[in-house]
Image (cartoon, rainbow, N blue to C red):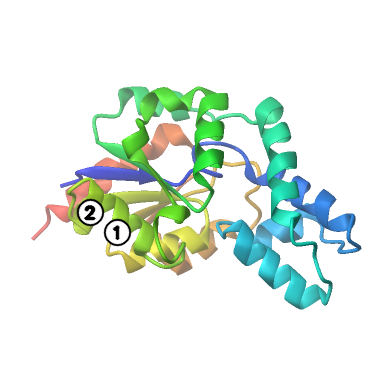
Amino acid sequence: MIDLVIFDMDGVLVDSEWLMARVWSDQLSQHDVDIPPRTLIDRFAGQTDMSMADVIAAESGRSLPRDILDRIRIAARKRLGTELEALDGVDRLLTEMIHRRCVCSNSSPDRIRQSLSVTGLDKHFGEDLLFSAADVPRPKPAPDLHLHAAARLAIEPVRAVVIEDSATGVAAAVAAGMRVIGFTGATHIGDGHAEKLKAAGAESICPHMSEIPAHLDRLAHLARQP
């Protein structure tokens, strides 16, 4: 009953949210906008860089430089290239998983490729299995990206399961008509986050990748019930 498992990337496959939040906080501070990494994570996890920059500029009243996103990408590339790690248990899960899988991320195509390459997870995903917000008109929380991936892989949305760590991603998957496992094993996850994922529509909460197979089996069993 499960024909495709869709993985978000940041905070699910790779432990990148704290790194990216520090990059953003450092860059913003250079323009007199002081937002701690924890605040950035709680407010913007799962959103695109463009949407983050627009909201921060509007709410701070500061005029951010036009090349702020380029500066952030350059700084992020440096830090991700030396500090990024895969989530514990991800490589083993992907090695042993029998289901088809793909990546759906609001990150840019270059960020996706770099993150998977640095952590050695690229061996589990061909280029045709990487889907970015750049592929669709609307990023998550719209359902466009998940529906685009399902269509490209000829999978009915109802037969896909999505693994997401943010309420933004969970909402997108639910809107696409897919079932969702909320993942809480990344280092950026704070108190009460599991409840936020459930409120957004996650059917179950998984704190470690080693438990994902059991969650998938449970969802498949429930789908077979009359």
Residue 187, horizontal then vertical, whole percent: 65, 41
Q: CA distance from mark 1 to mark 2?
A: 6 Å
Q: Are marks 1 and 2 in contact (CB under 8 Å)?
A: yes
Viewer-nearest residue: 185 or 66: 66
Residue 61, by quadrant, is bottom right
Viewer-nearest residue: 113 or 3: 113
Residue 146 in view here:
yes
Labelled disc at residue 147: 1
Q: Which residue is mark 2?
A: 151
Q: Amino acid at mark 2?
A: Ala
Which quadrant is the C terminus positioned in? bottom left
Labelled disc at residue 31: none
Side of 36 relative to 225 (left or right): right
Count residues near mark 1 (Cα–Cα under 10 Å), then give few for <14, some for 14-19, many for 20+.
many
Residue 73, horizontal then vertical, whole percent: 68, 45
Which residue is drawn at the image coordinates 50% and 31% (left, top)? 116
Which residue is drawn at the image coordinates 30% and 29% (left, top)? 97
Look at the picture and state if 29 lies above or below 124: below
Judged from this view, the residue extending furthest toward the front is 66
Look at the picture and state if 31 lies above or below 9: below
Which residue is drawn at the image coordinates 88% and 56% (left, top)? 29
Which residue is drawn at the image coordinates 15% and 47% (left, top)? 1
Residue 205, horizontal then vertical, whole percent: 44, 51
